[in-house]
Image (cartoon, helix red, strand yellow):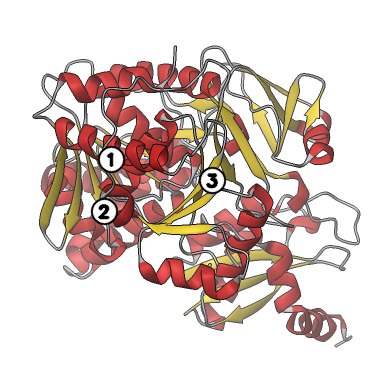
Amino acid sequence: MSFLEPILAKLRERPEHVFLQEALDGRMESATGAELVSKIDHVRGFARRHNLEKGERCALLGGNSIAWAAADLGLMAEGVIVVPLYGRQKASELVGILRDCTPRFLLCATAAERDAILGESENAPETFLLSEVLAAEPAAGFPDRVGADDLITIIYTSGTSGEPKGVGLRNANLEFMLRRTHERMSVLMQDHHGPERVFHYLPFCFAGSWIMLLLSLQRGSTLTLNTDLTRIVDDVALARPHYFQNVPVLLERMRGGIRNAIAKRGRLWGGIFEGAYRAWIERASGHAVGAGDRMRLAVARKALFPSIRKKIGEDLRALICGSAPLARETQLFFEMLGIPVLQVYGLTETTAICTMDSPGRTEAGRVGGAIDGVEMRLGTNDEILVRGPNVFRGYWNREAATEAAFEGEWFRTGDQGEVDEAGNWRIVGRLKNLLVPASGHNVAPEPIEEKLAALLPKAEQIVLVGNGRAHLAVIVAGTVSEAEVDAALEELNKGLPHYRKVRGSLIVPDAFTVESGLLTANGKLRRDAVAERLADEIDRLFAAEEVPA
């Protein structure tokens, strides 16, 4: 069966139900099942009028919108392979992707996006605006043309090092993943009656975000799309979601924002909140909690936490978090407020998901167990290996890269992990990020960076360096003082073995961004680019520290 069949059937079965809505400056622009079917038919009409053949590729560039979703669904229903592109990437990078996948057409949400591509390339594919596509004569009454083993989409990885690679996902991958995620969300919502409300701000061009779109349509949810990241708090209040998908950086900022807001209420309430948080962390770690902090936790539960939960979302059943490991302290923070965080682990190559927390059975700092039907084990250097119906077959036009990505039937994730007796996984870091200082020890930077981030809430990014050097040092981006960094390093280094101690720092005032080329499209560090951009400063940092006193 095609993964699209139940989605299209649901739209037709519920013509009056609002499936999608865009939050636009405090108002909603919605699309019912009937309206979405109509838009999809217009897209299919465009494809047929322009003789887009089954198996041809069509690139789709634009932010999240009802029009984007309709274009995606309509093209896929025609058997066209959709290549989603991220608008915040440099036009030169997008042109490189277009050159690699050779789409027949490029569909853009805005004229500015179209002009940026055309200004960068003389050989860009024929380009149309989504408004032109949706104005085409509709083609109604046709069944979807997706075959059981068809290639559905090519999603390009963010490329933390080297050029991004196109991950081909097939109908079987999607059918399996939608079935499994549907089962897990049914557990979360098992005692709920009526339509689900889901909020969404992550770009559909990423695999996990796209799965959430398809899942919401299949489940008949009302999915509210944020169109302005500066309005997320207001839009969440407007959408009143039961759950929504997140990346760790947003939850970290939410945690910092809540703590700052409480601190501004004065020393009394700030002290109660911080004492309650201390008590919660100590209790979760199995440590004894002093009477004072126990009392603060009891007071906070009655006087502070309910109002915070209401502001975040009074109907919220869970926050879902993926794309990178979430700090244990942050997960515990939201659980303290009564908001469970369900972690998800996966890669584009695994149709976004390998593990997922079960509602009511989370363990802070871990990402849950492998979902049913997926096998995971540890390979050399504790690399996580995966096999199952969720695993892709290969990269587009990259035979050598595909061969290197597999160990027999097992996909090599490149992530270093560990698993406990209950089958819950923890992600340690990326193998390619391992640092080997002059001591010869292997050091995963991510756990150290995570601890420093908790000690330096004002920092935007933290990057550990020291490969081949006498010791480790850290780059801190953001408005932090040298005294704050020194104090954080002193606290961090307590109890660490000598080879993991951080003995130097470089502070850069400007945060790393996608536009500067120092972050990937989904916000991950481009470590090689950071090291290259700051090479002289890093050399001076280590040279100064190696001069004898």
Residue 173's label in the rendered image is none
| Label 1 secondary element | helix
Amino acid type, mark 1: His
State left or right for residue 282 relative to residue 233: right
Label tally: 3
What residue sits right under mark 3 in the picture? 324
Viewer-nearest of labels 1 and 3?
Answer: 1
- Quarter holding the N terminus is top left
**Amino acid at circle 3:** Ala
Tag 3 or tag 1, which sits nearer the N-term?
A: 1
- Looking at the rendered structure, the secondary structure element under dot 3 is loop
The residue that mark 1 highlights is 42
Numbered label attached to residue 226 = 2
Nearest the camera: 338 or 398? 398
Instruction: Using the image, determine if residue 409 lies above or below residue 252.
Output: above
Q: Is residue 449 left or right of residue 540?
A: left
